[in-house]
Image (spheres, helix red, strand yellow):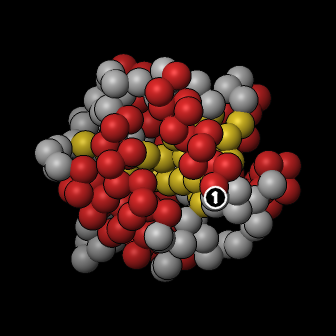
């Protein structure tokens, strides 16, 4: 219901089979937003929609604004405020976390409380999803090239195709702070 309402409010077409990715931290060098920028063409080739809170350095704001204008059916930029962040968390399936900065870790934990599954580097509060054991609360990439990040996202997108398994990953994410 939250995803349907969000898509209607922000001009995206709702499709339960298309995951909604979010980026809710400031677009800055400190937050390693360049790793996402480096693989954005590949991300846009996937069946995904992306929602961004529109804050950060002018360079990245311009980049993402231009990208959203070119891909209006796939990217939405929403004003950064507490109400919109709650809506983003409630609607999103995956949060992209490209850095271990304080801001990114805070956003990952906030999103996980809503069942949003992070694409994240190894942290003490996440467990890489293991499809054989059917356990984990995140998709963990090894730091290095942007392609490690992208490959991990693709792995998450493949798992998203299995609703029962995905629901279990979301439940594990929500239990992270227990």
Residue ID at (47%, 70%): 45
Q: Quadrant of residue 82?
A: top right
Q: Is residue 164 above or below residue 84?
A: below
The residue closer to the viewer here, 42 or 163, is 42
| Place of residue 77 in the rendered image (x, y in percent of width and height, measured from the top left) | 67, 40
Residue ID at (62%, 31%): 54
Q: Is residue 86 visible?
A: no
Task: Name the quadrant of the N terminus.
Answer: bottom right
| Place of residue 84 in the rendered image (x, y in percent of width and height, measured from the top left) | 73, 33
Give the total number of marks visible in the rendering. 1
Q: Quadrant of residue 176?
A: top left
Q: Is residue 55 visible?
A: yes
Q: Is residue 151 left or right of residue 75?
A: left
| Place of residue 143 in the rendered image (x, y in percent of width and height, measured from the top left) | 17, 44
| Place of residue 160 in the rendered image (x, y in percent of width and height, measured from the top left) | 48, 71
The residue closer to the viewer here, 50 or 107, is 50
Task: Name the quadrant of the C terminus.
Answer: top left
Q: Is residue 55 above or below residue 111?
A: above
Residue ID at (24%, 50%): 146
Residue ID at (32%, 48%): 38
- Residue pointed to by mark 1: 71
Q: Is residue 79 above or below residue 174?
A: above
The residue closer to the viewer here, 59 or 6, is 59
The local secondary structure at tag 1 comes to loop
Q: Is residue 72 left or right of residue 106?
A: right
């Amino acid at each position: 219901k939250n995803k349907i309402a969000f898509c209607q409010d922000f001009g995206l077409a709702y499709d339960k089979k298309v995951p909604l990715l979010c980026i809710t931290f400031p677009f800055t060098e400190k937050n390693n937003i360049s790793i996402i920028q480096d693989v954005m063409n590949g991300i846009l080739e996937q069946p995904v929609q992306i929602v961004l809170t529109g804050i950060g350095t002018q360079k990245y704001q311009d980049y993402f604004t231009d990208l959203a204008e070119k891909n209006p059916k796939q990217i939405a930029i929403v004003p950064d405020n507490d109400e919109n962040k709650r809506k983003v968390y409630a609607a999103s399936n995956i949060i992209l976390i490209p850095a271990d900065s304080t801001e990114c870790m805070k956003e990952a934990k906030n999103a996980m409380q809503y069942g949003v599954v992070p694409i994240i580097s190894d942290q003490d509060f996440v467990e890489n999803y293991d499809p054989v054991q059917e356990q984990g609360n995140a998709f963990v990439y090894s730091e290095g090239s942007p392609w490690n990040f992208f490959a991990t996202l693709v792995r998450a997108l493949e798992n998203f195709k299995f609703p029962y398994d995905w629901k279990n990953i979301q439940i594990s994410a929500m239990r992270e702070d227990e």
